[in-house]
Image (cartoon, rainbow, N blue to C red):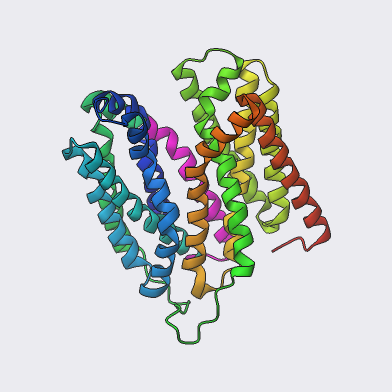
Amino acid sequence: MVLLAASVMPVMAIISLVPVLPLLMREFAGVAGSEFLVPIALTIPALCVALFSPVAGWLADRIGRKILLVSALVLYAACGIVPWFLDDLFQIIAARIALGMTEAVIMTVATTLIGDYFVDERREKWIALQVATTSVSAIVLIAVGGLLGEILGSRGPFLLYLLGLPIAGMAAMILFEPEDHARSTGVGATAFPFARVLPLVVITLGVGIVFYTLIVQLGPILELSGPVSPATIGMVGAVTNLSVGGGSFIFHKLKQHAGRMPLALGLLLAALGYAGAAYSTSLPSVAGFAALACVGSGILLPNMLTWTMRRLPPEFRGRGTGLWTGAFFLGQFLAPLVAAAVVGATSGLAGALLVYAGVVAVGSIVAALSFRLGSRTE
């Protein structure tokens, strides 16, 4: 449970600030380039996680998991609260960059420890719970962030980062350093299995883009059926996050087949969701297909992480998990950029959704054929 709580912290870093983004935009309207810089302040931690997760994984294998996680949680709280005291946008961005570096350590080490502490079905169970917990927590975090913003203004949600301190305390008291793996100190270490892991990391990057494109573009997607209020977008957003949790539950039932088969199923559901949203003309239909795509993502995310874990020797689990985490968060950062390019090329969001659906459907077919021709379990 401590590891699940720690895994929520990187999600909170962005989600909790979404309700106060308009307040921050107005506050820094006089700063040159604020229309670009303020959203960057919101999302820059995701890029930092993408860039520094491999380094965090290497450190976890070299110096240990527990001390790294506890230290990162303390620094997370310290860096996270800094913008509460700042009035300069560039200083806030600098603090957010430091926060993103601590997030890279937290997410990578928490996930690595799940792989260390549990094996086989128990590991798959907790990986699915990790994905479900981070998805469902977004519903609560965005509501709490909005409440703090309403009461305390644009800096209110930054107080939430202090939650890192009690979680650090619990981690220090409850977690333990795994004793059953030999860290790669150079003695008896084999070469990192790049050939086995990198293909899964590349697929994870694509899964991250597919997942976050729908999350980021949810408002415009819903507006394909006509004007939609912010409250409606928020309600549908809650449903899509619950749908991710539902997909994780489905994966839990399929965990013994983790690999190509859940990959094919998750991609199929995502493709159907994207295509259905593109063709739908009513709000309930668009929302339903968006939720279906998120069910697919809920299958894909724990499947890719479980698949990667199974291919990692214990001494390289930190580095491999760091690569996986980096790829997933890079997908989060790239999702709006890729979406903008595809929308521009297709002259509309509906056309872009069909392109996504087609690409994802091809991936599902390839995964299904690979499952039929190859082994059924990785």
- Magenta part of the protein: which range? 116-142
Residue closest to the far right: 373
Apparent side of residue 255 relative to residue 117 in the rendered image (left or right): right
Residue at image location 22% in from the left, 40% down from the top: 83
Residue at image location 18% in from the left, 38% down from the top: 86
Q: Is residue 163 above or below residue 169?
A: above
Residue at image location 63% in from the left, 35% down from the top: 293
Q: Is residue 352 above or below residue 3?
A: above
Looking at the image, can residue 47 be seen?
yes
Q: Is residue 343 above or below residue 372?
A: above
Apparent side of residue 369 relative to residue 268 in the rendered image (left or right): right
Residue closest to the far bottom: 187
> Picture quarter containing residue 84?
top left
Secondary structure character of the magenta stretch overall:
helix
Residue 67 % position (x, y): 31, 67
Q: Give whichever of 197, 333 is nearer the camera.
A: 333
Q: Is residue 298 magenta?
A: no
Looking at the image, can residue 303 be seen?
no
> Picture quarter containing residue 23?
top left
Q: Can you say which quadrant of the picture contains the C terminus? A: bottom right
